[in-house]
Image (cartoon, grey):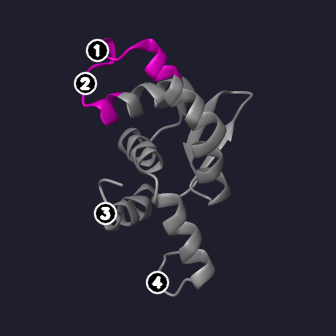
Amino acid sequence: MSDFRGASETRLDVLFGVLAKRRRRVALRCLVAYDTPMTLADLADEVAVREREATLAQIPADDVMQVYLSLYHAHVPKLGDAGFVEYSQEQDLVRLTEEPDRIRRLLDAAPTEE
C-alpha cells in the first residue's frame, strides 16, 4: 500500500471502504498496538474487549466467537485484499503487511465510530 497522497481514486475507494467498518479499524489498531503477528483467536479476544470496553471474562464466549467468525469470514480477508494484513491459516497467524506508522496515520484520519 502506498502513501495515500497521490493515490488513484480507485485506491482511495478501496482504502476508505476497508476503513469504513469499525471492526476492521479495531482489528488494525490491535495489530498495530502489539506490532507482532497474532493468532486469529487472540485478535478476536482483543477486538471483543476493545469493542465492549470490558474484560474478556465479562464477555460471553458466544459473543467472542461471533467476533472470531466475522474476522475469519469477512474482515481479515477484506484487510488482506487491501494489502493491510496477511493471514496464514496453516499457522493461524494474522500479521501486518504494511508499516505500523503508515497504518496508524490512516487510522488517525478514520472515524472512531461508524
The quarter of the rendered structure image containing the C terminus is bottom left
Residue 7, labelled with which disc? Answer: none
Residue for badge 4 = 5
1 or 4: tag closer to the N-terminus: 4
**Alpha carbon of mark 3 to alpha carbon of mark 2: how far?**
23 Å
Residue 61 covered by magenta stretch: yes
Residue for badge 1 = 58
Q: Where is residue 24 in the image (x, y as percent from the top left)?
A: 48, 48
Residue for badge 3 = 108
Q: In this view, does 89 lie to the left or right of 108?
A: right
Q: Where is residue 20 in the image (x, y as percent from the top left)?
A: 46, 59
As shown in the figure, which amino acid type bears the numbered disc 2? Ala
Residue for badge 2 = 54
Question: Which mark's residue is nearer the viewer, 1 or 4?
Answer: 1
Question: Which mark's residue is nearer the viewer, 3 or 2?
Answer: 2
Q: Is residue 98 left or right of residue 80?
A: left
Magenta span: 49-65
As shown in the figure, which amino acid type bears the numbered disc 3? Asp
Q: How many labels does the image show?
A: 4
- The image shows residue 81, relative to residue 88, as above or below, that is below
The quarter of the rendered structure image containing the N terminus is bottom right
Quick check: marks 3 and 2 in contact, CB under 8 Å? no
In the image as oriented, which residue stretches furthest toward the right?
90
Quarter of the figure with residue 30:
top left
Q: Where is residue 4 in the image (x, y as percent from the top left)?
A: 49, 77
As shown in the figure, which amino acid type bears the numbered disc 1? Gln
Quick check: marks 1 and 3 in contact, CB under 8 Å? no
